[in-house]
Image (cartoon, rainbow, N blue to C red):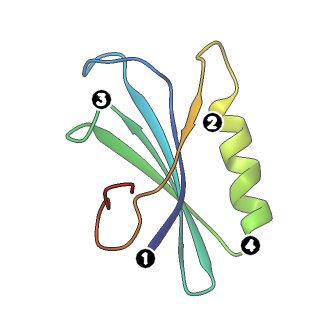
Amino acid sequence: MEQRRHWWNGKWGRLARRDVFLRVDGDRWHVEQRAGGAEGISRFYEHASVEEAEETIRALLDGTDTWRELSPRPPGGWAPSV
């Protein structure tokens, strides 16, 4: 499974942090909505197309939070910039 995009609501702490991830596995698109950081609770959505997944993401990002898109990590981890 490859992570394509990641959004974070810009808040720290287990009670306030929320993340939304877009991932692809073959021809299936997966959206994860996570509350509470890395050890938080997740809800998963599976879609047949990227358009359907993006529609779910738009609904999840709607609201008062200030969402920020974070870049996915490159394969093999971070490389130092030269």
Residue beneath the point at 29% across and 17% down: 15
Residue beneath the point at 56% across and 87% down: 26
Q: CB of mark 1 within 8 Å of CB of mark 2?
A: no
Q: Amino acid at mark 4?
A: Ser
Residue beneath the point at 26% across and 18% down: 13
Q: Is 44 left or right of 54, judged from the image as shown?
A: left
Q: Is residue 44 above or below residue 64?
A: below
**Of helix, strand and loop, which one carries label 1?**
loop
Q: CB of mark 3 within 8 Å of CB of mark 2?
A: no
Q: State the CA–CA distance, disc 3 to disc 2.
A: 15 Å
Q: Is residue 38 above or below residue 71?
A: above
Q: State the CA–CA distance, disc 4 to disc 1.
A: 15 Å
Q: Which is more N-terminal, label 2 or label 3?
A: 3
Q: State the CA–CA distance, disc 4 to disc 2.
A: 17 Å
Residue beneath the point at 46% across and 73% down: 2
Q: Which is more N-terminal, label 3 or label 4?
A: 3
Q: Which residue is mark 3?
A: 36
Q: Which residue is mark 2?
A: 60
**Of helix, strand and loop, which one carries label 2?**
helix
Q: Which residue is mark 4?
A: 49
Q: Amino acid at mark 1?
A: Met
Q: Which is more N-terminal, label 1 or label 4?
A: 1
**Of helix, strand and loop, which one carries label 3?**
loop
Observer-nearest of 7 and 31: 7
Q: Which residue is mark 1?
A: 1
